[in-house]
Image (spheres, grey):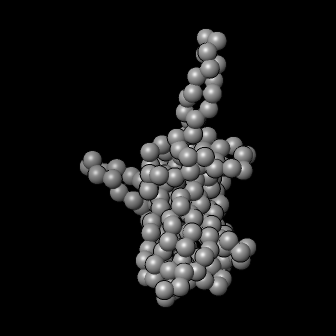
Amino acid sequence: MTTIKTGLRIAVLPLWLAISMTTAHGQQAKVTENTAAVNTVAAQPGPVHAVLSAHIVRTKDGKELLSEDSRKALPGDVIEYRVIYRNTGKQAVASVEAMLPLPEGATYQSGSARPNVFMARIGKQKEFFPTPIKHQVMEEGQSKEVDVPSSEYRELRWNLGELTAGESKTVSARIVVPGNVASALPAKPVP
């Protein structure tokens, strides 16, 4: 069995589902399908395809429902981003990483990431840290380690490892829509 060594990155631009993807070799991906709720991207060339969907999370009669059109999100709504990575090739692909930047002003909903083992980047820092991210604060003259609030997370990253031929893996995370972004949503996804 031959394994293709690659790394994939998927980036979601603020709330309107414009997508870019880059392989470890710097190759750009392109949008191959574009609908109101789902965009599909594929590495050029490569066997791993990623499908992103974004849904508003609603509760009705005590049950959680996912809407089909996240463009109707209002301030305070929760949006779930879900990305399915599928190896459509005939060989395994190693070192697949899923990366999900969070929209400007949006707040990551703590505990919503799946798988729940992931790394995050805060602020304008370039490096990722295991979650929960810790930092030192001084309290009554003593140094104390505390969690960085998940609202400060700006990008999430999962190590998906190897995708065998035909295998797929899913990552997801939820954000809370800020008041200043929802009103600026365009009428359709940005190409």
Q: Is residue 187 visible?
A: no
Considering every residue shown, the one lying at the far top of the view is 140
- Percent x, y of residue 22: 68, 71
* Residue shown at 57% from the left, 69% from the top: 95
- Percent x, y of residue 120: 59, 49
- Percent x, y of residue 111: 44, 45
- Percent x, y of residue 114: 44, 55
Q: How many marks?
A: 0
Picture quadrant of residue 148: top right
The answer to whether residue 187 is above or below residue 181 is below
Q: Is residue 14 visible?
A: yes
Q: Which corner quadrant holds the C terminus?
A: bottom right
Foreground of the two, 170 or 145? 145
| Side of 23 relative to 62 (left or right) | right
The answer to whether residue 38 is above or below residue 107 is below
The answer to whether residue 24 is above or below residue 63 is below
* Residue shown at 73% from the left, 73% from the top: 26
Considering every residue shown, the one lying at the far left of the view is 61
The answer to whether residue 59 is above or below residue 150 is below
Considering every residue shown, the one lying at the far bottom of the view is 90
* Residue shown at 48% from the left, 86% from the top: 1
* Residue shown at 66% from the left, 54% from the top: 184
| Side of 129 relative to 26 (left or right) | left
Considering every residue shown, the one lying at the far front of the view is 1
